[in-house]
Structures are given as C-alpha cells and as structure tokens.
Amino acid sequence: MSERRPGTNYLNVSYGIRSWLFTVDHKRIALLYLGSVTLMFLLGTVFAGLVRLELLTPAGDLFSADSYNKIFTMHGIVMVFFFLIPGIPAVLGNFLIPMMVGARDLAFPRLNLLSWYLYTIGALFTLFNIVIGGVDTGWTFYTPYSSAWTTTNIVPVALGIFITGFSSILTGLNFIVTIHTMRAPGLTWFRLPLFVWAHYAMSIVVILGTPVIAITIVLLALERVFKLGFFDPALGGDPVLFQHFFWFYSHPAVYIMILPAMGVISEIIACFSRKRVFGYSFVAASSLAIALLGFLVWGHHMFVSGQSVFAGLVFSVLSFMVAIPSAVKVFNWTATLYKGSISFDTPMLYVFGFLGLFTIGGLTGLMLACLGIDVHVHDTYFIVAHFHYIMVGGTVMAYLGGLHFWWPKITGRMYPEWWGRLSALIVFVGFNLTFLPQFIVGYLGMPRRYHAYPDEFQVFNVMSSAGASILGVGYLIPLFYFAWSMRYGKKAPDNPFQATGLEWTTPSPPPTENFPVTPVVTEEAYAYEKMPIPAGGARAV
C-alpha cells in the first residue's frame, strides 16, 4: 500500500473532471450519484409544482388536457425511476456499505462506475423525450393505450428506463457480493449494521424483480414498433397480462425504495436514543421477510381488472401478511426509543417524521388491501395520497435524515443545526398539508389524472397546492445550507454524534482506502452502552 500524505482524503487525493469521471472509488461514485439524483429530484419537483398549479382551479385553465397528461407522466417517471428507486442505495449505500463491512471498496469497483454511467445514459434518453414532445401514458404505461393508441414518444422513455434498470441490477449485485465476501474479521452476519441488512434484502428484490420490468418494456416496444401481439387485443394480446408483469416488479419496487430507508432509520434511532436496536434479529429478519412477501402481493393492484374473486381474496390476505414484518420494524423502533436517552437533532427529527408518515401510509395500505374499500377508492386521490405517504413520506424523510446523519463523514463539514431542524419541521408540515386533503378528496370521489374537477373539490386542492409550496421550500433549504457548509461549515470531527459502526472510526472525510489496516470487529452492533453521551445530547460539537 502506498503511503498516504497527511491530510489526504478521497476528496482531495486528485483534482480535475477526469479524476471524477473515471474514478473507481465508491465514495466518489456516491457523490456522482448524489449530484445526478438531486438534479432529477429537482426536475420531478418542478413537474409536481406544475401539477399543483393546474389543480388550484377546477376549470383546468392553465394547461390543456394533453399537456397536463404529459406533465404528471414525467413527474411520475422521473421521481420513481430516477430518484426514489436509486436514491438511498446509490448515494448512501454506495458510500457506506464498504466502510460498514470494513472493506476498501465494493467487490467490483469498475462495475460500480459503469452503473452510474448507465443511470446517466438512461436519464438522458428519458429527458430527451421531453424535448421531442413528451409522453402521456402515466408512469404505469398501461396497454393497449401505450402500445397502440397514444401518439406520444413511448420508445425513448422505455429505452431510458430499460437502461437504468441495468444500473440497479449491477448495484444490487455489487452489494450482495461485497456483503458476502468482504466483511472484516469478526463481522458475523448478526453483527452487521441493520443498514447493511436492509440493502442486502433490497438487492435480492432488485436482482429478481428488475429483469421482469426490463422484459416487459422490451415486449411493449416490440408491440409498438413491429405490431407483435402481446398486449393489444386487436393483435391477439391481453392488456391484463401487461398489468401482471408491471406490478410483479412495481410492487416489490416499493420495497426497493423503502427497505434502504428502513436501514437508515435503524442507524439513526440507535444513535440518537443511545441504545441497541430492540429485537435486532427480528428487525434484520423482517427485511428479508418484506423482500420475499413483496413478490406475492402484486394482484392487489388489480382488484378491478376482472381477476377472479378467489384471486382477489388470496391477494388481499397476502397484502395483510406483508404488513406484519413492516409492523415488526415500527414496533421495535418504538421499543428502542422507550427509556432511551433521546436527543432531537436534525436526523432524529426526520426519523420522527418518517415514523408518522410511514405509519399513516401503512395503515391506509391495509384499508386498500380490503377489496370493498379498494373498489370504492380505486384510481382516486386516496390512492395518490397513500403511495405518496409510503414512497415519498417514507423514503424522502429517511433520505434527508441519512444525508444529515452522514454529511459530516461525507464532506468533513458540519451543517447548520438550526436550519436543519427548521427544514425538517417545514418538510413535515408541508407534506401533511399537501397529502392529507387528498385522502379526503379521494374518498369523496375525485379521480386521479384529471386536470379539471367539480367545484366542490376546490378547497381541498387549494390546501394541497399550498402545502406543496411549503414542502418545496422545505426541500430547498437543505440544498442551500449543504452547499454552504461544504465551504463554510465547521470542520467535523471523526465521530461528531458518538455513533457506533466502522464508518465512524475513519477520518472525516475518509481516505481513499477507507482503513489503513483491515479492522477487526470484536463486539455486537450498536454497543452504545460503551459509548459516552456527549454533553447536551448526542452531538459532540
């Protein structure tokens, strides 16, 4: 191993665009992803803002129906495929997993870089679609509308998502091989941080599920371009078959988003309550249970598709079952907080936000697992509110919490705590003001995807649009103070929150090789009883 210059870390070891574009350092690749997913998040947020502007008034007088269809379609595609699915694994997972297992890098560093290039190429194909006129099918691409009837540009978007799918597969494969083969001596499976367990389960879902959506998209493109009959009844196909394929992947995709988020929550709760996660083994096992059960519940998206009553009953029961491991996590996190030495720093505020929003999303998911309720609210704003509470409320709160928690390790700088707490509060208030009214207006019968609606729904839509404005401000504040902190923030100590875990034993920011010598693990995860409690809470600075 070459001798490292004093003060050298992964950020300043080399300079220039080339050193970043051809890097194989997992930490630099994580930052490349951070820049990419942030850009896509901002773009998706702009589309969401346009949707909410249109819905301020009942008349649908800002955009035409066709333009509105394209705007909400791009909002869904950009947010789901280019932010929510890759966000936490590509940024925090890439940065942390090698350090958490005591390795110098992921098992396949060049493959890791290739996955970022595939993500970028896929994003460019998708954005190119905007330039040439957009697509109006909704992010679900239901056939035969997407394969036969729409005149918009399906193929570039499908190609972009297809390419990006390979990025996810390569990342998941890299995580699994790294966790299996590169753990430090003494780091047994049941000493692994729960963040690693969560990413391991997520990777299984990615590798088993993503090829299904990739093949489905290929079939869609073949039918659209060459008129081969897979999903179009006029060509001898079955449109419901597309829904089976789509949801076989897309329901597990919810767990691709939420499992890494759950891993983040476990790390933060343990640190800021100064306790080992209650029922560690059950929380770890519940990640695998969620991953496996997630493949058995796709049919609850199709209660009104004409499937048999018996099939609907089976999928209803299975949907209730998948709530059990999720509930195990929430109950065990709550038990961890009980009698803990809790401090209310920014990451912990985001955790509290996650617990509230995810619980609301989960409980309304149980309502939707009931056939009668699902039939009543199907394709209404009730569904929109439910999946935003799970996918956005859960995943984004955890992503922001994790970003604050590990920001000192990533950059070597502290963020301004007061601004962090303020942004967490604004995000929570803005989110609930945006989506709680949608539960009501959806239950009352307002369909989703409509750009005009009856006058009696306006007050709820005005509340929702006002909330979206507040939420947008809450999302922008961290963007500014994170950028500010990289130059002006207070220098971070190696372990500012007195947290456990191998990543906190490295300097901030870490050197290229992570560890000068391979660490040896001698204790269980989350041994907070051996860690000092800093004066004033968990913060040491």
Image: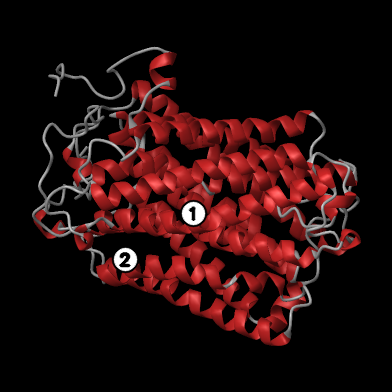
Q: According to the image, label 1 marks what residue?
A: 206
- Name the side, left or right, on which 317 lies relative to 147: left
Within 10 angstroms of label 2, few (less than 14), some, or many (20 or more) residues?
many
Which of the image's four quarters has the N terminus? top left
- Name the side, left or right, on which 111 lies relative to 220: left
Q: Quick one: 521 or 440, which is closer to the camera?
A: 521
Q: Is residue 96 above or below residue 452?
A: above
Q: Hey, what amino acid is under mark 2? A: Ala
Q: Quick one: 232 or 152, which is closer to the camera?
A: 232
Mark 1 vs mark 2: which is more N-terminal?
A: 1
Q: Residue at x 35, y 13 (%)?
A: 15
Numbered tag placed on residue 284 in the rendering: 2
Residue 474 in view here: no
Q: Hey, what amino acid is under mark 1? A: Val
Q: Is residue 428 above or below residue 36?
A: below
Which is closer to the viewer, label 1 or label 2? 1
Q: Is residue 181 above or below residue 281?
A: above
Q: Residue at x 20, y 33 (%)?
A: 493
